[in-house]
Amino acid sequence: MGAVPAGDLTLPDDYPELLEQLKQRVRTAQTKVVREANTELLRLYWAIGKALADRRDKEGWGAKVVERLALDLRREFPGTRGFSPRSLAYMRAFALAWSDHDAIVQQPVARLPWGHVTVLLDKLDDQATRGWYAAAAVENGWSRAVLLNQIKNATHRRVGTAPSNFAELLEPAESELARELAKDPYVFDFLGLSGPVAERELEQALMDRIQQTLAELGRGFAFVGRQVRFEVDGDDFAIDLLFFHVEQLRYVVVELKIGKFEPGFAGQLNFYVSWVDDQLRRSQHAATVGLLLCADRNERVVRYALGGSSQPLAVSTYTFDSYGDTRTYEALSPAERAAVPAAAELEAALDAPMEVHGHQVTLAEYLEQLAQHDDTPNG
């Protein structure tokens, strides 16, 4: 018999519902398989790393033995990647960093791809900080590139640090949640801006890169509107940016100021938050909060201004530069530049030829060889 044309087939009434249920079960199963496979891979890497760590401590295994082990493993499993000397060094570092094998599967790191784990090992030395970023990466679904950027900009040191009056105007539990919404400073290095800019220019740049803006604001922020206009008895006003936090169920009013904080800014934001609280907030919503972003602030002036506000407000600064400790050569003072080689000098030095064991190599090539042979976590 031939196939019955779909157009001639009368389907049961509950067919669409059943199809959706089965598709969801397939997707859930696929996700589970990938997650379990990733966890099993991490178990394998941990076991290899633990064996290497034990033998290095007890039997003095060095780089040459590890290099031979990597070669033998690649010969035995030619279609399997991840057995280079450097990869084995990462595995050892992984086992040393997360020393409890049984607890690994219960920790966020077990749900991260191996590439994310190597970033945590490479960029961070403190285990508690690694755990913070592992949990945040899982919760927010950060890609490897986003994880790198969050570490570079020291997100763990910025969350909840903006001065606010949340503790005075909100219940303790709600105050803690609201504090998590405000970073200090916000890092808008992805905007490509520098120096003084107009408020509308900053606002437009943030909207042009709304996905990156939302990522910097944090998990749960949903964009509601820009220049949200409203009228009060014939007078017109406009809120710069309005967001809704879908997890805390609250509106967040954001005002942008390009200069230093002034007390009047708090009064303006207090007014906007009051209007949103009165006109947009529903009974199931948490209290609306206001977030003022300015280029600079005087801490004491901020404290006095917030003390006179009737609405929960926070004042944060922002920067267009990366928040990490590194600075470009151009940003150094003349005295610092004199002590540090410029980029061109470094590039010339790395390209300079040198002889190693009778072979001509550049300094860059030699350093790469050392990194491949080194069995330390950071190579």
Image: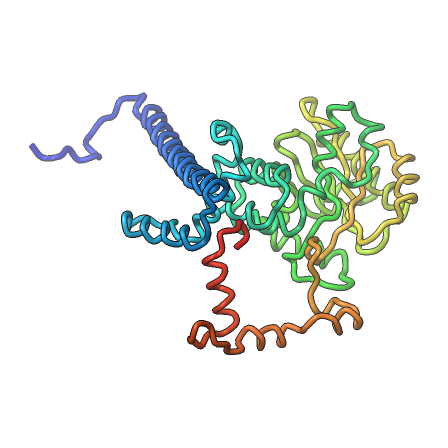
Query: Picture coordinates of residue 141 (x, y %)?
Result: 52, 40
Q: In this view, does 21 lie to the left or right of 147?
A: left
Query: Picture coordinates of residue 15 (x, y %)?
Result: 30, 24
The residue at the point 75 percent across, 74 percent down is 338
The residue at the point 71 percent across, 70 percent down is 340
The residue at the point 60 percent across, 40 percent down is 130
Q: What is the quadrant of residue 348 in the picture?
A: bottom right
- Residue sitting farthest toward the left: 1
Q: How is the image coloured?
A: rainbow
Q: In this view, does 317 lie above or below 349?
A: above
The residue at the point 63 percent across, 57 percent down is 190
Query: Picture coordinates of residue 204 (x, y %)?
Result: 67, 56
Query: Picture coordinates of residue 137 (x, y %)?
Result: 56, 40
User: Is the N terminus in the top left, top right, bottom left or bottom right quadrant?
Assistant: top left
- Foreground: 320 or 258? 320
Q: Is residue 96 above or below residue 16?
A: below
Q: Is residue 340 left or right of residue 27?
A: right
- Foreground: 273 or 297? 297
- Residue sitting farthest toward the front: 59
* Res. 50 visible in picture: yes
* Res. 91 visible in picture: no
- Foreground: 347 or 288? 347
